[in-house]
Image: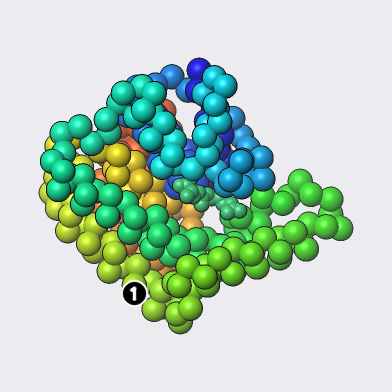
Amino acid sequence: MIILHGFGPGFGLPEISPFVTKTEVQLKMAGLAYCKEKAVPPSSPKGQLPYVRDEAETIADSTFIRAHIEGKYGFDFDAPLSLQARAQAWAFERMIEHHVYWALIGARWVDDTNFAKGPAHFFDGAPEHLREKLREDAQFRVAENYLLSGLGRHAPDEDTDLAIRSLFALSVQLGDKPYLMGDTPCGTDATAFGALAGILTPFFDSPLRARTEKFRNLVDYVDRMMGQYYPEFAWSPLREAA
Ligand SMILES: N[C@@H](CCC(=O)N[C@@H](CS)C(=O)NCC(=O)O)C(=O)O
């Protein structure tokens, strides 16, 4: 059986990492049996989660895991899509992973209140005399990556302004369809769901979340996808909360 290494549930989500969520949803889409194990990024060959173990193979990075599923199990995530639609889906995925994702990271890790409420607790089990230093170092490293992503160079509201342009594009692409590219889910739906659920989780307050909530079709999409792929998870529909 495939072993998916992720962070596990937290922050009001079935899985705290958007990238692990992407892979988990894709495993569900492909109908593959898997079990999940908690891991930390340094245990991964690429220093990041997710990675999977499939018999003798270890595959790191959500996109390479997807390629592995497609190659080994012959499952085409984008089966109903034309070549042009496949290209568009890929472009949307890159926008989500290289742009929207960083806005989520800024809201979760760089915002001090959200950091204290969320990621700071990763270090709760560390020896007391080291705990604060580990927290500070981790927040500093992520803030540095956020800066390098380009989004973190802007004033606090400007990063959200830029991310909202991408979320607007996503909202327009979704329109009133059930999934991003039509009536059936494709690979990029897993990516979009992971990032959007991570932004919209009621656990964190942020201008990014407040402004994303205005895209009603994205809110409904997260509720629908959560019900479809994580029916066992106690999720209070966002639509009802709003
Ligand atoms: N390109 C990677 C990105 C994975 C990623 O950024 N994972 C984050 C968690 S959401 C991580 O492990 N970060 C730890 C680190 O970069 O040190 C993928 O698609 O899997």
Closest to the observer, 234 or 92:
92
Residue carrying label 1: 161
Task: In the rendered view, tell whether residue 62 sits above or below residue 36.
Answer: below
* Colour style of the rendered protein structure: rainbow
Task: In the rendered view, tell whether residue 88 sits above or below residue 135.
Answer: above
Horizontal and vertical percent position of residue 145: 55, 66
Determine the residue positioned at 41% across, 31% down. Answer: 68
Determine the residue positioned at 38% across, 71% down. Answer: 160
Most distant residue in the bottom direction? 155
Q: Is residue 189 visible?
A: yes
**Label tally:** 1
The local secondary structure at tag 1 comes to helix
Determine the residue positioned at 49% across, 73% down. Answer: 152
Task: In the rendered view, tell whether residue 84 sits above or below residue 69.
Answer: below
Task: In the rendered view, tell whether residue 108 sits above or below residue 144.
Answer: above
Residue 133 in the figure: left or right of residue 196: right
Quadrant of the image occupied by residue 115: bottom right
Residue 5 in the figure: left or right of residue 13: right
Badge 1 crowding class, 10 Å Cα cut-off, few under 14, some 14 to 19, many 20 or more, is: some
Determine the residue positioned at 34% across, 41% down. Answer: 190
Quadrant of the image occupied by residue 242: bottom left
Residue 11 in the figure: left or right of residue 121: left
Give the amino acid type for the residue marked by disc 1 in the picture.
Asp
Closest to the observer, 198 or 37:
37
Horizontal and vertical percent position of residue 73: 36, 22
Q: Is mark 1 within 8 Å of ligand 1?
A: no
Horizontal and vertical percent position of residue 65: 44, 35
Quadrant of the image occupied by residue 184: top left
Residue 169 in the figure: left or right of residue 121: left
